[in-house]
Image (cartoon, helix red, strand yellow):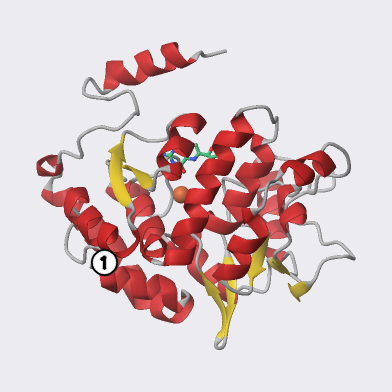
Amino acid sequence: MTDTATLFAQFRAKHPGIRADYTIDQDWQHYTREEHATWRTLYGRLERLLPDYACPEFVDGMHRLDIGHDAIPEFTELSRRLGALTGWSVVAVPGLVPDDIFFEHLANRRFPAGNFIRKPDQLDYIEQPDVFHDVFGHVPMLAHPVFADYMQAYGKGGLRALKGFDKLSNLARLYWYTVEFGLIRTASGLKIYGAGIASSTAETVYAIDDPSPNRIAFDLERVMRTKYRIDDFQETYFVIDNFEQLFRETYSDFAPVYERLESGPTYEPGTVLPSDSIVHRGTGAYAAGKALSTAHQAGKSPAA
Ligand code: HBI
Ligand code: FE
């Protein structure tokens, strides 16, 4: 087990300037021309796609914040614009930070963003959230007042969950299926609001256009019982009707929900239940194709 002090010492060895809340200076001067070019490439691809695929609130946030057309944004400047809209700020961290630190930032309306950017040969897949995912993916929605409140409430809920409840995995699923991979119904069809989708060209198209994944109406307890994939496109997306609904259904104290979660099932990512309100029943073709090719690579037949 890694205790808090040991973990912090490990971070400090790599990032000598790290503060107790795991923030570092963004050190904007250090980005190379190549790194800004990586940002520009990713930004350009999604700027063309998102007006059709993302919800109007996301696109609106992108434009109102002037997120950074040409270069990796400078966090202080960005925070000034974001702060004027919803009181949130963006602070630099070296990568994934411990849960308590992460929740503490959110509870105080600070979004911790990785300050590094992916390498040019990893444009489509990264293991750790970088500045493009964190800023381009997450920050536009933080300009929306209701979503901004939802994120803060999530941080507070996380801090409560750390004290006394053993339900962090359930809470992480809520974050995953909303903040990272959420879809929303709009007058012009299903749209994206989740950062994990919106920062990926391929998943943006897949989440909306592909017949493979399930799209199921959001239900708090259902979501908290559903496992997720971290290494591939999702097999199921959960759909909200509007941000007020999301806030309302997650604002109350989770204690009664946690109590129900003490027993009962956990669902696999691709499961569809009779009780689900189904927006689109997925064919499962994408996940099945993946399972097949994985089995082939391992030199096994899929039936084995
Ligand atoms: N740290 N920087 C960073 N970004 C995250 O999204 C993040 C994190 N630490 C913990 C965490 N997410 C999740 O485990 C929580 O939502 C549960
Ligand atoms: Fe994220």
The residue lying at 55 percent from left, 88 percent from top is: 188
Residue 147 lies, in percent from the top left, at: 48, 62
Q: The disc labelled 1 sits on which kind of residue?
A: Leu
Q: Residue at x 40, y 58 (%)?
A: 137
Q: Nearer the viewer, residue 284 or 302?
A: 284
Can residue 196 be seen by looking at this rendering? Answer: no
Q: Position of residue 301 (x, y in %)?
A: 78, 46
| Residue 127: quadrant of the picture | top left
User: Circle 1 is placed at which residue position?
Assistant: 65
Can residue 70 be seen here? The reply is yes
Label 1: which secondary element: helix
Identity of the residue drawn at 57% across and 63% down: 182
Picture residue at 47% right of the left edge, 16% below the top: 4
User: On the image, which quarter does residue 234 sit in?
Assistant: bottom right
Pick the front one: 42 or 27: 27
Residue placed most toward the observer, 171 or 38:
171
Please determine whether, in this image, residue 172 is positioned above or below residue 51.
above
Left or right side of 221 for 52: left
Is 153 displayed left or right of 277 in the figure?
Answer: left
Relative to 174, residue 217 above or below: below
